[in-house]
Amino acid sequence: MAYVVFILFLLCLLVPVFSYVIFPWLMKVRASKITYSKQNYTNIKDWPAVTIVFSVFNEEKVIGRKLESIVNSDYPKDKLLVLIGSDNSTDSTNAVIEEYITKYSFIKLIKKTNRNGKLKIINELIDLTTTEHLVFTDANVFFEPLTIRALIYDLVEKQAQLVCGNIHKFSPKNEGISDQEIFYMNFENRLKHNESLVYDFCVGVEGGCYAIKKQSFVKVPDGFLMDDFFITLDVISKQGKVVFEPEALCYEDVNDAPMIEFKRKIRISLGNFRNLRYYKHLLFPVTKGFGFAFFSHKVLRWVTPFAMIVSFICSLILTMYVPFFKWISLAYGMLIVLPLLTVILEKIKLKIPLVNALGHFILMNFALLLGYFKFISASHESAWEPPKRNV
């Protein structure tokens, strides 16, 4: 029995190691043999009309900067339309947008007098679009002048159906968990770029910045929460090309409060499990193509908290056979208190890199676990509210 438990222990350890270390390394090695060619924007003589779509709710802190990043784009202004749905904003968000409308006729505002949620707002805005090329974004994601052009280039020249922007996280205050979140998102961007080079798809676009052909867009059903991932999986299921575009650079403020990010990760986890149930057929065959990437990049991460729990139980059982496992069990026990220590360190504004990193990892996996329990309890959570902005 000891051998069976030991093998199970090793397999459970392999789950996060494969997803966070081995698979990214495999993608890096394979991508290193492929040359990425920079965009030749002169290839397009007549740029197509583009509609930028996003919803807002009480975004007075960032909406002005957001609109500035759009109007300062080098994309032809006569080919731009901006559709903004305000989800019953109660601060000065609408007033700021209306001020921009007086100066830029291509900006349109649709105001709601009651809360609808992000998905319903977006689905309604889609019905108002008339262009073939669409860009979806968030109020706190700020474009570089080249961003829109880089996104549309891939739709036109590379025959992509969906293009993922290159979102760089930043933290004005550099406090709390900002370092960990910035590191993780940079890691994700590199992985998605490598997947895109190797497979002609990346496993999941970021909702903060992506472009899509209108014919490839599907309205996301109520309750799916992770609309960007749902749309990615839908495009993949139809054999569409999904690319990561490093030149579509933009910036997003990172949340630095552990508990706020913890709640956001629970919501993300709930949405991911709903998407997995709906698109589970895309996992097969799991040994190649999208099935392998989907399983390695996403599904293994989602089951990591379960693997950690099982490996802890296995280590406790193995202490009866191998005394050394007492130390491993003790190490597991110490990991449990790290999330609390991370929150305390954030409160006193103290950084201990290894402790902060491990504590953040454990806390986010605990959020994954809670998200799964909400999923199996048939939670109907769907309301959308943006986190506190740090800009």
Image (cartoon, grey):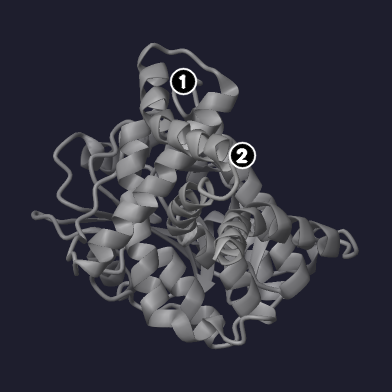
Residue at label 1?
175
Residue 97 is tagged as none
Residue at (66, 59) in percent of width and height: 18
User: Few, some or many C-alpha atoms within 10 Å of disc 1 (few <14, some 14-19, many ≥20)?
Assistant: some
Residue 329 position, x and y percent, is: 50, 40
Task: Please tell me whether residue 173 is drawn above or below residue 26 in the rendered image.
Answer: above
Residue 241 position, x and y percent, is: 64, 78
Residue 188 position, x and y percent, is: 61, 51
* Residue 51 quadrant: bottom left
Label 1 sits on what residue type?
A: Glu
Task: Please tell me whether residue 98 is drawn above or below residue 278 in the rendered image.
Answer: above
Q: How many marks?
A: 2
Residue furthest to the front in view is 321
| Residue 36 appears in the picture as rendered | no
**Secondary-structure class at tag 2:** loop
Label 2 sits on what residue type?
A: Phe
Task: Please tell me whether residue 211 is drawn above or below residue 168 in the rendered image.
Answer: below
Quadrant of the image containing the N terminus: bottom right
- Could you tell whether 320 is left or right of 277 in the image? right
Quadrant of the image containing the C terminus: top left
**Secondary-structure class at tag 1:** loop
User: Few, some or many C-alpha atoms within 10 Å of disc 2 (few <14, some 14-19, many ≥20)?
Assistant: few
For marks 2 and 1, the one nearer the N-term is 1
Residue at label 2?
324
Residue at (41, 34) in percent of width and height: 255
- Could you tell whether 44 is left or right of 3 in the image? right
